[in-house]
């Protein structure tokens, strides 16, 4: 079969796969080990914050760290375990705590326990097992925005009521946004700002190295050439997004399979880009706040009628969109900041007007995204909110 001629183990291209070695994140992994070394050396828990844009490896870094630290601690006679909570899926205190408790008891009831009672059950589990637990709150900003800082504070202070000086729980928060500013003063006091690992976007060369490692694991020898990997890394470097690069490789391989080929060609990469742009867009849209979404929706609606538009036209449509969704429009200065943020994320292209345009204004366009499809995607998301 063509599939066997292209892939040797397609699971190695899954977002859930955590490589034994994270290419170009070795220094960040070392930073986390430095932060949490006191867990083993002095039984002292720590808190850390990992931040970075989409596809910079935040989740993979946290999982690789937890796996490696667990093995390291075991070698020192220190029992360590970890649990990851996706706060987009579990955005309330009780839902997040339930995920943590189900790590120890898969049949723990999903109702009937208050937050203090669930925290006490967690204390008992850790005490009975003599275990140090790492709790990873992935996309923590969603939890903080919806439910506030109380859970972060409670988990950080879990050991205070115990007579034993040994700490049982360390906390890692992950967010695309600078979530520390979302903590109230009490919760923020439990975090050292120096315990922050900020992941930059990958360069084209770094993306090529990541793809090379994944291709060696997932693709048959000779089924993908360096030129194809360079093309994929060049496309993905616009966003510095390793997830996008890996997804392009997988999709191009599937297209080569469907064409009954023995190797992936550049044409399949180009077709894969056309197939996958909406997935990249969706991951970026999920990170936006309500009014950023409304501003982008306004731009998409105006741009259905032409290739370019102006700030003024988009701002008028933004006001109408706010009324449609029951929101009060923000002022011009705040709206301008939304446009700048959307431009920085690559969802919009903005530039100063040139010759032929009276006065000074900003010209807005969409890069590689059909305006009608983008508008429909945002409307679908806002409908869920």
Image (cartoon, rainbow, N blue to C red):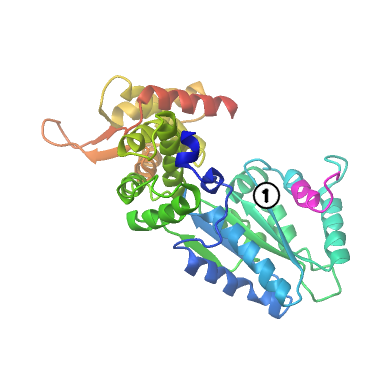
Residue 276 position within the rendered picture, expressed as x and y whole percent measured from the top left: 43, 34
Position of 43 with respect to 317 (left or right) is right
Q: Pick the residue in front: 143 or 102.
A: 102
Position of residue 321 relative to residue 338, above or below, is above
Residue extending farthest to the front is 1
Q: Is residue 211 magenta?
A: no
Q: Nearer the viewer, residue 157 or 263?
A: 263
Residue 313 % position (x, y): 30, 26
Residue at point 33%, 21% (across, down): 304
The tally of labels here is 1
On the image, the x and y values in percent for residue 190 come to 66, 66
Q: Secondary structure at mark 1?
A: strand
From where the camera sits, is residue 67 visible?
Answer: yes
Number of residues whose C-alpha sits closer than 10 Å to that of mark 1, classed few (under 14), some (14–19) or many (20 or more):
many
Residue at 85%, 59% in the rendered image = 125
Please give the residue where the numbered disc 1 appears in the rendered image.
Answer: 85
Which image quarter is the C terminus in?
Answer: top right
Q: Is residue 295 visible?
A: no
Position of 374 relative to 18 (above/below): above
Residue stretch rendered in magenta on the structure: 97-108
Question: Residue 342: which quarter of the image?
Answer: top left
Side of 17 relative to 270 (left or right): right
Query: Residue drawn at (33%, 39%), measured in percent from left and top?
Result: 265
Question: Would residue 99 be counted in the magenta stretch?
Answer: yes
Image location (x, y in percent) of residue 378: 47, 28
| Left or right of 88 on screen, residue 257 | left
Q: Nearer the viewer, residue 138 or 20?
A: 20
Q: Residue furthest top?
A: 305
| Residue in front for this viewpoint, 384 or 107 | 107
In the rendered image, which quarter is residue 326 located in?
top right
């Amino acid at each position: 079969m063509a599939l066997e001629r292209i892939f040797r183990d397609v699971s190695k291209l899954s977002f859930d796969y955590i490589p034994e070695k994270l290419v170009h994140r070795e220094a960040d992994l070392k930073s986390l080990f430095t932060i949490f070394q006191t867990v083993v050396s002095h039984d002292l828990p720590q808190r850390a914050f990992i931040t970075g844009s989409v596809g910079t490896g935040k989740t993979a870094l946290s999982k690789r760290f937890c796996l490696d630290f667990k093995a390291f601690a075991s070698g020192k006679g220190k029992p360590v375990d970890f649990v990851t909570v996706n706060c987009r899926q579990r955005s309330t205190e009780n839902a997040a705590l339930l995920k943590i408790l189900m790590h120890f008891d898969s049949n723990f009831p999903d109702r009937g326990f208050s937050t203090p009672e669930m925290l006490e059950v967690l204390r008992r589990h850790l005490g009975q097992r003599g275990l140090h637990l790492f709790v990873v709150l992935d996309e923590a900003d969603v939890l903080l925005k919806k439910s506030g800082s109380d859970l972060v504070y409670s988990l950080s202070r879990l050991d205070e009521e115990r007579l034993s000086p040994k700490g049982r729980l360390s906390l890692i928060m992950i967010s695309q946004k600078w979530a520390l500013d979302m903590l109230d003063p009490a919760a923020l006091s439990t975090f050292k700002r120096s315990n922050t690992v900020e992941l930059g976007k990958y360069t084209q060369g770094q993306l090529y190295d990541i793809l090379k490692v994944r291709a060696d694991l997932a693709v048959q020898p000779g089924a993908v050439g360096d030129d194809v990997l360079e093309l994929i890394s060049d496309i993905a470097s616009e966003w510095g997004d390793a997830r996008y690069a890996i997804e392009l490789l997988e999709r191009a391989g599937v297209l080569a399979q469907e064409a009954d080929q023995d190797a992936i060609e550049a044409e399949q990469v180009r077709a894969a880009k056309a197939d996958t742009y909406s997935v990249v867009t969706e991951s970026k849209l999920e990170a936006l706040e309500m009014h950023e979404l409304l501003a982008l929706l306004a731009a998409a609606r105006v741009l259905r009628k032409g290739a370019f538009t102006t700030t003024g036209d988009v701002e008028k449509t933004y006001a109408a969109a706010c009324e449609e969704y029951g929101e009060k429009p923000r002022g011009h200065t705040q709206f301008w900041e939304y446009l700048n943020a959307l431009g920085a994320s690559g969802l919009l292209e903005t530039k100063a007007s040139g010759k032929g345009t009276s006065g000074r204004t900003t010209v807005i366009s969409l890069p590689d995204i059909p305006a009608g499809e983008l508008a429909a995607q945002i409307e679908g998301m806002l409908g869920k909110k």
